[in-house]
Amino acid sequence: MQLLQVLHLLILISLAATVTKAERISKKGCNDRCGEILIPYPFGIGTNCSLNKWYNIDCNSSTPYLSALNNTEVLRVNGGEFTVKVSMSYDCARPVQHSTPVLSKESPFYISTYANKLFVEGCGINADVMVKKTIVASCSTICRNDTVRDRNNCFGIGCCQATFDSTNRNIKTFRLNVTGLEGPAGDEICRSAFLMDSSYFKAGFPIDKNNTYVPITLSWNTDTQDDNNTSPECKKCQLKGGYCWLNLDADSATSCYIYKGRNLGVILGVSISMGLLFLMVIGYALYKIIKKLKAKRRKQRFFKRNGGLLLKQQQATDVDETILFTSKELEKATDHFNENRILGRGGQGTVYKGMLADGRIVAIKKSMVVDESQVVEFINEVVILSQVNHRNVVKLLGCCLETEVPLLVSEFVSNGALSYLHSATSIPIYHRDIKTTNILLDEKYRAKVSDFGTSRVLSIEPVH
């Protein structure tokens, strides 16, 4: 068990080291966090920490800003995508659509068509997202007088949403055409149409006059968006755990970055963890095997010491073989020698009540000590008594020699003993080894003699 505890501790330490190494996501010597926001490579804070100028992050008062996008605030960076704040004007009297992020042709960024959706809230609104005079997403709403906005059921009644056309991947700019925002005269219900990261929308991000922005997610790894267009170079890059992106202005040339320090740490951590887990499993299996082997050898040693080999020899010549019970059988029969199964105690041992696998109720005697010099006599008497079949003698069914002291198994006699015959006298009367406690009564109150030979030769104590 100590080996298992040590292995368990080692694997926990290794997993902790793996997490620590995996969290190192920036270049060596560079900060990987601005406030509560992680800044992984290719983004970076400070000189020579980012891939190039497009990924440079300014950390101002624990808030990250992307300088290449007019100091747009960054909300999160996750894998090949990052979410930024995009300004939005909101006025119930004069509602207007939000502006698109400024993504120049030179920038490596584009609008994620997976993370973002078109959302419309309000009554009687139609909105289209246009890219080069092509509608890539469209959404319309209808309402009743009692319509309540419910973002969990945003399917056209007071609220709608639309995903982008799957053929459009690399979107840098778009136009949002909306009709119906003004509403009828005297209608004070606010209406809005906007592009937004769907995870923020589902989380209940408020769109009202108190907010001047919406979260939009941008991407820089085009190949992860379209597996059919993935270049062999990018596939190799991704297999190595690197970042790959497509330079649209350089004839679709790809670039790859692999931060070796980070990958090596992750690989080492995972490898060590898996190795320790394997060792723990192997160690536990070996522990169980060794434990079984020790128990088996111990049983064999007791069997030999208690005369098992002699009994085997005698069984080879006798017609009626003495039944040899296993220690496992008798442990199960007595519920591991439970105190509640005790029928009685004496100077020579304890008697337990047990039930064998075939349903027979038996008495199992566990002696206190063994006189090894009388083992031969004990085996001879076991063989003889197990062949005795008399109506007034308790039948000896067999024995178990796999334990430290032999266990005797006899038939169970239910109505106690005749010890009360001498209980009223001041001094108990013994007739050699036939005591009143050895005379039992069965269910029909027939007397049966028990325990008059085998127990005597087992014990080194004197007999009265």
Image: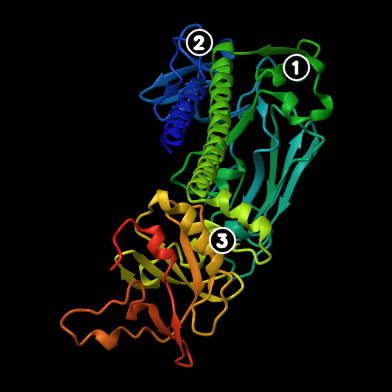
* Quadrant showing the C terminus: bottom left
Point out the tag, 1 or 3, that comes first from the N-terminus: 1
Identity of the amino acid at label 3?
Phe
Identity of the amino acid at label 1?
Lys
Task: Name the secondary structure under disc 3.
Answer: loop
Residue 350 sits above or below residue 72 on the image: below
Which residue occupies 30% across, 59% down? Answer: 461
Calculate the distance from the C-alpha at mark 3 to the C-alpha at mark 2. 76 Å
Calculate the distance from the C-alpha at mark 2 to the C-alpha at mark 1. 24 Å
Q: Is residue 68 visible?
A: no
Left or right for 48, reference 116: left
Given the current orientation, which residue lies at the most extreme right position?
228
Per the rendering, the mark at residue 236 is 1
Percent of width and height locating residue 442: 46, 87
* Of the pair 416 and 38, the residue shown nearer to us: 416
Percent of width and height locating residue 187: 55, 61
Q: Which residue is mark 2?
A: 49
Residue 442 sits above or below residue 274 on the image: below
Which residue occupies 46% across, 82% down? Answer: 413
* Of the pair 125 and 329, the residue shown nearer to us: 329
Which residue occupies 65% across, 67% down? Answer: 320
Given the current orientation, which residue lies at the most extreme top position?
48
* Of the pair 284 and 31, the residue shown nearer to us: 284
| Nearer mark to the viewer, of 2 and 1 | 1
Percent of width and height locating residue 6: 42, 31
Quarter residue 101 falls in: top right
Calculate the distance from the C-alpha at mark 1 to the C-alpha at mark 3. 67 Å
Point out the tag, 2 or 1, that comes first from the N-terminus: 2
Q: Which residue is mark 3?
A: 325
Label 2 Cα neighbours within 10 Å, binned few <14 / some 14-19 / many ≥20: many
